Amino acid sequence: MRRREFITLLGGAATAWPLAARAQQDGRMRRIGVLMVGDENDPVYKSRVSAFTQALADLGWIDGRNVRMDVRWAGGDINRTRAFAQELVALQPDIILANSTPATLALQRETWTIPIVFAGVADPVATGIVARLDRPGGNITGFANYEPSLGGKWLELLSEIAPGLKRAAIMFNPDLNPVSVYMPSFETAARSLKVELIGAPVHSDVEIETAIVALGREPGGGLVVLGGGFLAAHRAPILSAAARHNVPAVCNGSDFARDGGLLSYGVGGDNFRRAPTYVDRILRGAKPAELPVQLPTKFEMVLNLKTAKALGLAVPPSIWLRADEVIE
């Protein structure tokens, strides 16, 4: 066989070499830290970690074979988030996956050297996580979960599905939700729709109940629930109070709508399927500073028709046509 033909065949074989084999070529076990703000018993957050693990495996990084996964669950508690950030950094992993803005900020305070990939940050530039979207410039990059304009979008959807809307409470946990990112678009939409905005910061089930009771005392009240580990962990009391006090609620997470909320609109778990592409590239030598932050490419809307009927709402065709999933 001629030397040129041999080299051509060798190049073709390298291209076809299985991803798993390429991931193991140096024989070293890699360590991946994962910091989740949600609860480990929450099926939504468990499914997101599973999606991340499966996508990694598709790229050749298999837990227990050539990577070791160290997962920590903060359960919506900012103090646990910070403690687990310290714990994961002390393990000196090759890379860390951060779920949410608070988790990313907690890790940023602990290390400037270990690569961090986030899967869900509202505005990474405004929160000081990266210098620029196109060139993050440090040890952190990832996949933004929201856009600032979503605040106005949630309010518009609430007004659309509940046309008598006069007041809208924005529910958030001030320790875990960067509500300021969305306020300009909330305020613009509120002026256009002639809706009064009410801030509803909550830290407990008691505060959740108090806010929704006040909202439901008069007709025309509605609720926008931001995302985050705390509100996800406390969605049962939020949904229960909203149902009892006849308050329509639009939420960021699809888990709210599937569990009884009226309507959700957001990214869902798509970033956990996308994040492994950056983890893979960094483990192979890429620098986080040079990997641009990726913006959302897919949004999903979930409509709970049962809840709409219970609230006495007629769902407009514009909502029906845009819904990716309708729960009957």
Image: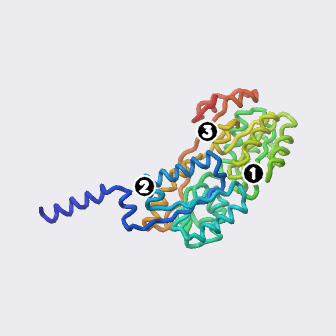
**Residue kind at label 3, given as amino acid type:** Met
Query: Pointer 1: what residue?
Result: 172
Which one is nearer the viewer's eye here, 210 or 300? 210
Q: Which residue: 62% across, 61% down?
A: 124
- The secondary structure type at the circle numbered 2 is loop
Q: Residue furthest left?
A: 1
**Does residue 23 appear left or right of residue 121 in this picture?**
left
Q: Residue furthest front?
A: 64
**Residue kind at label 1, given as amino acid type:** Phe
Q: Are marks 2 and 1 in contact (CB under 8 Å)?
A: no
Query: Pointer 2: what residue?
Result: 59
Question: Is 110 located above or below residue 303 in the figure?
Answer: below
Which one is nearer the viewer's eye here, 205 or 246? 205
Question: Is 325 located above or below residue 207 in the figure?
Answer: above
Mark 1 vs mark 3: which is more N-terminal? 1
Query: Pointer 3: what residue?
Result: 301
The image position of residue 15, as x and y in percent, is 30, 57
- The secondary structure type at the circle numbered 1 is strand
The image position of residue 212, as x and y in percent, is 82, 42
Which one is nearer the viewer's eye here, 64 or 226? 64
Give the foreground label among 3 and 2: 2
Q: Which residue: 45% across, 66% down?
A: 29
